[in-house]
Image (cartoon, grey):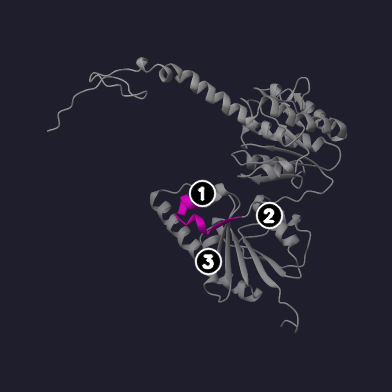
Amino acid sequence: MTAPGTIARIRVAFVVHTFQMGGLERCVSHLLNNLDRARFEPSLICLKRSGTAAQWLSRSDFPIVELNKPDRHDWRLPGRLSDVFRDLRLDIVHSHNWGTLLETALARRKVSGVRHIHAERGTVFGGSHPGMIKGWVNRYVLRWTLSTCDAVLAVSDDVAVRVVNASGFPANRIQVIPNGVAIPARAFVLGSVGRLAEVKRFDLAIRALGQLPGDAHLILVGEGPEQQRLESLAKELNLEQRVHFTGRQSAVGPWLAAMDVYINCSRSEGMSQSILEAMGFGLPEVVTDVGASRQLVGGDAGCGIVVPPDNVALLTDALTKLSQDSQLRDQFARLGPIRLARDYDLAAMIRKYESLYERLAEPRVKNPATRPVHGDGVDHGPGACGEMTEVNVQ
C-alpha cells in the first residue's frame, strides 16, 4: 500500500532475451541505473539468463528475474511471464527486439492494467532470413503483436523503416528515441561517423584509444557488418565502457558536437563527406593519407594531422599529441571552418554544377538552328532526337 499523501512509483520491467554485453544491454543498463527512483521502480526480466552485462549495473535496488527459457520453443513461457508481471505488480513492460515481443504480448494479455512498450533496436527478426512461408508468418505475427502494444519505439529512422518494411505496421505509430551515451564531463572524446565496414579500419581507433593517456572515450556513429567484431575487440581490450556505438543516426550534428577530435582511419577513400562535416563543426582531425584526405586536412593552414593508413602507432602518437596540446586543437578548430568556407562551400559547389550545365547546353539554347529537325520539318526542341516514324494504328 502507498502511504497517504505520497505518489505511487511507476513499476516498469525491462524484458530482454539474455543480458550479455551489447548495445541493447548497454541502453537497458543506463535506464536501470538512472531512472529517477522517486518516480519509478524498475526491474529486469531475462527470458533466459542474466549475463556479463550485469557488471554495467551500478545499482542493486531492483530485482533481476531469470526464467531460464530452453533453446526450443516453450509454450508455457507466456504463462510464467504473466505470473512474474503479477508478482511485480507492474504498470509497464518494456520488451526489446523480436526475441521478446510475442512472449511479452501474450503474457500481457493475461494481466489487466499492464501497458506494453516494445522497442526495436537493430535488425528486425534478429537478422534471420526465413523461407517464404515462415517469412509470411513472421510478418503477420510482427504486425499483429505491434498493433497490441501501447507504444512502439525505434532507435533510429532507419530502424523504423525496417520495421515498416518487415511488417507493414504504420510508420506514424513508431516513435524514434535515439541511443544516448554516458561520457564523463572531463573526458577526452574521439569520434568518427561512417559505416562499420572493414575498409574504415575502426579497429585502429579502438586500439589507439587503449594506448592514450587519461580517460579518453570513442564514439562510433553508424552501423555495419563489423559492429560485432568491433564490440568484441573493445571487450577484449577492457574498453567496452569507453567505446560507444550509437547505431545509424539520421542527424549526426549532436554527435559531432560531443567530440573533441574527429578520426578517419580508412584504408581507402574518395573525398570523405564526414571529414568535411567535421571540419565545419570546428573539429581538429586525424586522418589517414588516402584519397583526398590530405588535401582536405593537411598542408599550410591545415586543420589536422595526416598519418599513414594501417599504422596504429602513428595514429596513437597523433591523438596523444592533440590530447595534450589544447592550443594546437584550438588552432585546428579555428582553421577548419575557414578552409571549408574557402574551398568546399556547398553553395559554391552548386554554382559550379549550374555553370557546367549551362555551358554544355549553351549552343542549343543560343542557336535553335542547331537543334535537330525531324522528318516532319518541325523543331521538337532540345529534348528531341532520332527521326520521326509514321505509325499506322489499325
Quarter of the image that includes the N terminus: bottom right
Name the disc covering residue 162, or none. Answer: 1
Q: Is residue 64 visible?
A: no
Image: magenta residue range? 162-176
- At mark 3, the secondary structure is helix
Q: Marks 1 and 2, how far apart in space?
A: 20 Å
State whether residue 245 is above or below residue 110: above
Label 2: which secondary element: helix
Foreground pick, 17 / 138: 138
Give left or right: position of 262 versus 174. right
Q: Quadrant of the C terminus?
A: top left
Q: List the residue tagged with mark 2.
A: 27
Instruction: Point out residue 87 in the picture as x, y percentages from the top left corner.
Output: 64, 76
Up/down of 179 relative to 288, above or below: below
Pick whichever of labels 1 and 2 is earlier in the sequence.
2
Q: Secondary structure at mark 1?
A: helix
Callout 2: few (<14), some (14-19), or many (20+) C-alpha neighbours within 10 Å? some
x, y (%) of residue 293?
68, 24
**Where, by quadrant of the figure, is residue 78 drawn?**
bottom right
The disc labelled 3 sits on which kind of residue? Ala
Three-letter amino acid code of the residue under disc 2: Cys
Mark 3 or mark 1, whichever is nearer to me: 1
Label 3, on which residue?
105
- Kindly check if marks 3 and 1 are in contact, taking CB atoms under 8 A apart as contact: no
Compare residues 145 and 164 and report the one nearer the observer. 164
Residue 288 location, quadrant: top right
x, y percentage for residue 299?
A: 76, 20
